[in-house]
Amino acid sequence: MKAKHVLYFVVGVLAILGILMAVFPKDGIRLSDEWVLYFPSFKEVFHKEDKVLIDTDSIVGNQINIDSLMPLNDTIKEIDLEELKKLLTPLEFPEDKPYALDNFFAKINDFENEQKVRITHYGDSQIEGDRITAYIRNKLQVRYGGFGMGLCSPVAVYSQFSMIQENSQNWKRYTGFGLIDDNVTHDKYGPMIAFNRFAPITDSSWMPPDTKYSGWLSFSKSDIGYNNTKKFKEIYIYYGNAKVKSKISILSNNEVLVSDSLQKGDSLFVYKYVSTDYLENVKFEFEGFDSPDIYAISFEDVSGVYIDNIALRGSSGTVFTTTNGSLLIESFAALGTDLFILQFGGNSVPYIADKKSAEQFANYFYYQLAFLKNAVPNACFIVIGPSDMAVKLKDDFETYPNLETIIEEIKKTTHKAGGVYWDMYKAMGGKNSMKAWVNADPPLAGTDYTHFTPYGTSVIANMFYNAFILEATDYTNRIKNEQVDK
């Protein structure tokens, strides 16, 4: 082949490639749900974009122990709180409500009148297994007092960080989110947006069977759990929708502590058992011609801080207005919830394509906040927004294209509802930080580019806790200064 023919061939190939670069769709051609065909543009070939590298070593290395800097009930004079805020990712308050958490801070600083203070932490799979919640609970209980995990799902949903759970095989859990069982003909799911039964669901034509049903649940301390979670004195069982009375026995170390009955009726009932000594493990044995709907079991002490972990895998946080509102209001009153932490948004990120759909999601989320605010008027609210999440685009993992828009809309909605926002995305380092967290040594996030590793969980939880205690200390100082001025 002559040289000029080779030249013509090379020029022709380059021309074809140039045409493809010019006309090929920027977002590629989707071949299936999983495959997209891309072709590089001139800019991508000749002007490689410099991406900001997130220094995870600096993020981890700059973590502080805020409890040592700000001991409880001690006015801080040596530390400028405003300067310290610059080192943290602070809580963001609505402009017209700079003291939106004062109701809660007042209670947590006055245990003489408030024996118990309760935080209910709802979230998606990011908090599953008591992740994030367990760290914050331990820090708060060490600082303010309290033992026990708070609310637990009666039936083990997943491996739990703070307690080991087991149950007989006949138990079934019915959720008010995700795939809802067609056999459920009501919307009474309770505070964990799920109920549990040891007998099959019945209909209006139910007649007592010839034999009784029975089932058991066991809870024991976890070796990897925090010490404050490993013991408790008070047990609460939240249940309802019971056609008949049923028998309950509570055992510890094979010793029967009490045998009693659960009530018949449609209302919310709370069964309470108080031990004179601390317990580390318990077993519940149930028997009856039918099972009540058991919503939750709580393990507590006689006083202290309690933070419930309620993980709703796959949920976008828009569940409160789709379940029975009266039951939720009763439940929050019985629990005594003082602060809601809502950690949602991540499950919606892959499906929100533009600003309009982000605004629509945020608007729907607003109605959830408005419902909770109306249900518990004196409670405070903190919304933890989505973390960075990465998707593979061409040959690399990058932040989802509309994530920052979604975060901004959730933040605006939170402030509109009078709530406080904490920006987990910003705390991680912002755009493309998830890739850095995955590649850190040791890894701070998993290779799904969505969820944190146990180590990463403790880092992000500490970031939130520091921001929270900073505001709690600011409240304490402000109140003390007001008293001095008087």
Image (cartoon, helix red, strand yellow):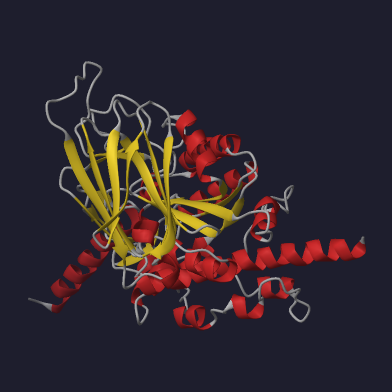
Q: Quadrant of residue 245?
A: top left
Position of 13 relative to 174 (above/below)? below
Camera-side residue: 111 or 126?
111
The residue sitting at the right extreme is 486
Camera-side residue: 424 or 164?
164
Residue 131: x %, y % from top left:
39, 63
Residue 162: x %, y % from top left:
36, 64
Residue 184 visible to the viewer: yes
Location of the C terminus by quadrant is bottom right
Residue 393 visible to the viewer: no
Residue at position x 24%, y 42% in the image: 286
Residue at position x 54%, y 47% in the image: 410
Instruction: Say left or right for 84 vs 464.
Output: right
Instruction: Say left or right for 244 vs 137.
Output: left
Residue 348: x %, y % from top left:
40, 46
The residue sitting at the left extreme is 1
Instruction: Say left or right for 56 vs 198.
Output: right
Q: Quadrant of residue 227?
A: bottom left
Position of 272 relative to 319 (above/below)? below
Camera-side residue: 184 or 46?
184
Residue 22: x %, y % from top left:
34, 56
Count of picture labels: 0
Position of 105 relative to 294 (above/below)? below
Camera-side residue: 196 or 291?
291
Q: Quadrant of residue 37?
A: bottom left
Location of the N terminus by quadrant is bottom left
Residue at position x 45%, y 54% in the image: 308
The residue sitting at the top extreme is 205
